[in-house]
Amino acid sequence: MKDITIDYALRATWQAVARMYNEEAKKFGSTMAVGFTLLSIDPKTGTPSTSLGPKMGMEATSLSRILKRMEEQGLIERKPNPKDGRGVLIHLTDFGLEKRTDSKNVVLRFNEAVRSKVSQDKLDGFFEVMDSINEMIAEKNVQNTDKTINGHKPE
Amino acid sequence: MKDITIDYALRATWQAVARMYNEEAKKFGSTMAVGFTLLSIDPKTGTPSTSLGPKMGMEATSLSRILKRMEEQGLIERKPNPKDGRGVLIHLTDFGLEKRTDSKNVVLRFNEAVRSKVSQDKLDGFFEVMDSINEMIAEKNVQNTDKTINGHKPE
DNA sequence: TCATTTTATTATGCGTGCATAATAAATTTT
DNA sequence: AAAATTTATTATGCACGCATAATAAAATGA
């Protein structure tokens, strides 16, 4: 029985990863959140902004400013969605694709490093606990039933 | 083999918990970060601000503004540290102690809910993965060797 | 003792994430 | 079709966490 709480371990560990990711991203002139967003955009077809929020596990409004800055930096282009006058399609520029690759490498390096340190068994336990937490929270919020993390991957 | 990355699960899950914690904290006029800080202060002896950052797994500078607001809200008092003219001792006010109890209940409820959903085995896997990640990151940053999460608890 | 270095804290700016509110374009209802 | 509702997006303000820089008080070294 560990001496720390689940939420504390989750929080402190995520913060540590976030610090590290931001540090890495800085090396190629980016940030963690921008990197995650780049990874959530389909390089070939582009991605309707509607699906970005759920895909990234965050509120849609939170993306507004990030996308704005990404557009200003020339990482993405917003194109009107022919199927919905309200919606927007997010496309990567060549520059964005380049940064996307950089971001992907950071993510891959981290995940491989962790997987090489822990057994698949422990990792399964980790993912199950994550699933349980998300389920539990989703149950409390009736309107958010589609916000489970399963079935999504950042690519 | 899950279809999502470790960092993604960590991030999305933590964000979900953070949203929930903030929602709960709002009910008694507080926030998640303030709640965590309250829980990290010893109600009897007070806590030197030096130890708050490491205890909470965050940079010391990040606490400055939070403590400032907490003082303005009457949750804490900063008293000079008799043993070190540079340092400050953080003490809870009666009001702070009250909010600390509220915050503690939120944390306890969450942890109990998770523990009732997952086996101790899975939970051990979770904690081991968290430890591995923190170790790995600590190894990269030579100056941060004392930043492991083990041995700390938010109370 | 005096100078240098280390340590504790605060100030500031930036990026991030949320809630809330506003706007505009569907969609549904009548 | 016109009105009401829903949905997609943006704007704004607040809280948070970080890095960097500034300040002040030890601690260390000469």
Image (cartoon, coloured by chain):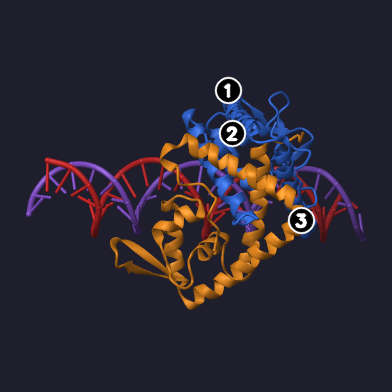
Chain colours: A blue, B orange, C purple, D red
Q: Residue furthest bottom?
A: B94
Query: How far apart are the two marked residues, 1 and 3, measured between alpha carbons?
Result: 38 Å
Q: Chain of mark 3?
A: A
Residue nearest the observer in this picture, A44 or B93: B93
**Callouts 2 and 3 close, C-beta under 8 Å:** no
Tell me residue A40's x, y (percent).
Answer: 68, 34
Res A84 → quadrant: top right
Q: Chain of mark 2?
A: A
Q: Which residue is mark 2?
A: A35
Query: How far apart are the two marked residues, 1 and 2, measured between alpha carbons?
Result: 11 Å
Residue nearest the observer in this picture, D13 or C27: D13
Q: Earlier in the sequence, mark 2 or mark 3?
A: 2
**Callouts 1 and 3 close, C-beta under 8 Å:** no
Q: Which residue is mark 3?
A: A136
CA neighbours of label 3 inside 10 A, class few (<14), some (14 to 19), many (20+) = some
Q: Which mark is residue A98?
A: 1
Q: Amino acid at mark 1?
A: Glu
Q: Chain of mark 1?
A: A
Q: Earlier in the sequence, mark 1 or mark 3?
A: 1
CA neighbours of label 2 inside 10 A, class few (<14), some (14 to 19), many (20+) = many
Residue B121 left/right relative to D10: right
Work out which quarter of the rendered image holds the C terminus of chain A and state it.
top right
